[in-house]
Amino acid sequence: MSNGTAESPFSPSAEKSEISSNNPSAFLSQITGAKVAVKLNSGVEYRGDLQCVDGYMNIALEQTEEYVDGVLKNQYGDVFIRGNNGMLVFCFRFVRKFGRYRRIMILNFLG
Amino acid sequence: MLPLTLLNTSQGHPMLVELKSGETLNGHLVNCDAWMNLTLKEVVQTNSDGTRFFRLPECYVRGNNIKYLRVPDEVLDIAREKNQQQREEQRKSNQPQRGGYNRQYSSSGQRGGYNRNRGGGNFGRGGGQFQRGGRGY
Amino acid sequence: MENTDPSLLPSIIFTTAAQLVDCVDKKLLVVLRDGRKLIGILRSFDQYANLVLQETIERIIVESMYSDIQRGVYIVRGENVVLVGEIVSFTLFFGSVAFDLLLTYLNLKDPEKENSIPLREVSLDEIYAAQQDEIDNRRRRELTKNSKLIDIGFSIDTQQEDMY
Amino acid sequence: MLFFSFFKTLIDEQVIVELKNDMSVRGTLKSVDQFLNIKLDDVSVVDEVKYPHLSAVKNVFIRGSVVRYVHLPGAVVDTALLEDATRKEAASQASKMGGR
Amino acid sequence: MADTGADQLDDTIVSEPLDLVRLSLNERVFVKLKGDREIRGRLHAYDSHCNLVLSDVEETVYIMDDEDEDLKTIQKQSEMLFVRGDAVVLISPPTQS
């Protein structure tokens, strides 16, 4: 997905950074399709393929796994996660680079 | 006589304000607005479990932090008299009725405050029924 | 984005104010999100369900004990209200025990409603102590429960939980 | 507005409103508003021992934000109609969201 | 990169998250609520706040036993249920494994 150019952890992946608009939701649509982890501020984490996101930070994932402190608790197929205002959502975008995952953390400033 | 009208009448009178956090403020109301923001003077602030007291010459309270206010009984009587007088003046000069039920409906009141249980305008698309992260509808 | 969608206008005949209008000048029970129970006469309200209550008492109830504090005039901010209940008026003069007897006498008693435990009035200090115990062990239980719930993948509402 | 209209079709039906503090109140749905605040008549608390403070209350106004569930009589609800109305509302919202 | 696979019909493509919920209308879904509850039922209505109406609902409530402070579950049934959206965390359509 991203080529190997040096990236600061918070910058969007290289090949999509040419989308100039810095509107956060436009940025989020760049990462659809990637494998993401959505961590709710209660500590529960949902990992899966990001189908889509909307302005309320509602999130649709495929092949979802529910983790608590790194331990797998539940598995679901498709999942809709409500973008609660009370839930700060961190999306880690796993970027395959040299065969290992690198985490780019995208703080949610929308919620 | 609307709640905010009673609040306006309480200006200059002592009152107790309890915040959502449980802290209470005892002081004289200096000023207030349509969002229930208040300024108080000669204030005694008490923490939520009532163990610590602070003296503040003056303080500003944001409306959405307020749980409730307690005002002396006489303020309600004063407010009612003022209300009657207004009605009499109107009847005498038979202007269109200024106060009363329909005025409350025509103005949509303040703009902000998503956690208030309100519509945008009174007939807006159903306002911030849920506090969805500060987004407007 | 403010839009007064014309199709909405006729349908909104039910509004918050319309629901409270027939409670004005009536004796009401108002339960707040922090668990407080206020009993007073509703003098006015607005479209946000802010309430003006007169001759209000605060009733603290713990298990089957209660105690009342005279409080006077309140302006309650609507978003803190859980529910507003219209009280069968003569309750307040008689208190719950007598109310029960009265109901049986007037054979208005609801047959299948087992006789609710009449509340016993106690002193303020006694009720404050009982209330503090109730709050303390509720908090302790909630802490242990929440940590177990998070362990199995539940998301706990981290905002200060309401106590009503 | 979908659920506001839906609840208006249930006026005068017997429902049970379950609050987020686990208290449940049975009563006749008398009115509802756009924030889904609910008014019930002839109320009775499901667990009177635990919640004695409503023993002398005959009707209540409950704020929408404290409601967890409303248990409804199944027979009265036309589920097919409800699904169509839901699709219409979703479509109208999608077009509105598009316009934001 | 919306999935372009078999679903050519416009309304079966998930272009926004709530479409996933729309595709589950009249299907049994699993809903996880804040705190200590899960519900399974047939979905008949939803809106952008995630208010829901479900039928033939089975609710699982996790309660803590008083003595041994261990988590136990109780099952509750409901013929027709309105669920207020602000407590909804997650909705999973029927393909759930």
Image (tube, rainbow, N blue to C red):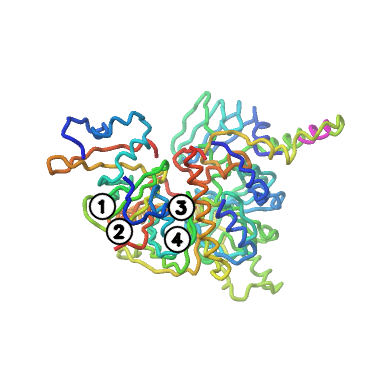
- From the image, tell me which residue sits under label 1: A68
Packing grade of label 4 (10 A; few <14, some 14-19, many >=20) is many
Packing grade of label 1 (10 A; few <14, some 14-19, many >=20) is some
The amino acid pointed to by label 2 is Tyr
Chain containing the residue with disc 2: A
Q: Which residues are the magenta region? A: B83-90
Residue C110 in the image: x percent, y percent? 63, 73
CA distance separating discs 3 and 4: 13 Å
Res. E25 mark = 4
Do the residues indicated by labels 3 and 2 lie within the same chain of the protein?
no
- From the image, tell me which residue sits under label 3: E50
Helix, strand, or loop for circle 4?
A: loop
CA distance separating discs 1 and 2: 15 Å
Helix, strand, or loop for circle 1?
A: strand
CA distance separating discs 1 and 3: 24 Å
Image marks 3 and 2: residues in contact by CB distance under 8 Å: no
Residue B36 in the image: x percent, y percent? 58, 34
Do the residues indicated by labels 1 and 2 lie within the same chain of the protein?
yes
Quarter of the N terminus of chain E within the rendering: top left
- From the image, tell me which residue sits under label 2: A76
How many numbered marks appear?
4
Q: Is residue C20 visible?
A: no
A78 displayed left or right of D80: left
| Residue at horizontal 39 percent and vertical 59 percent from the top | E31
Chain containing the residue with disc 3: E
Give the number of the mark in front: 2 or 4. 4
Q: Nearer the viewer, residue D54 or A91?
A: A91
Q: Nearer the viewer, residue E61 or C145?
A: E61
CA distance separating discs 3 and 2: 19 Å
Most common secondary structure along the magenta stretch: helix
- First reached walking from the N terminus: tag 1 or tag 2: 1
The amino acid pointed to by label 3 is Cys
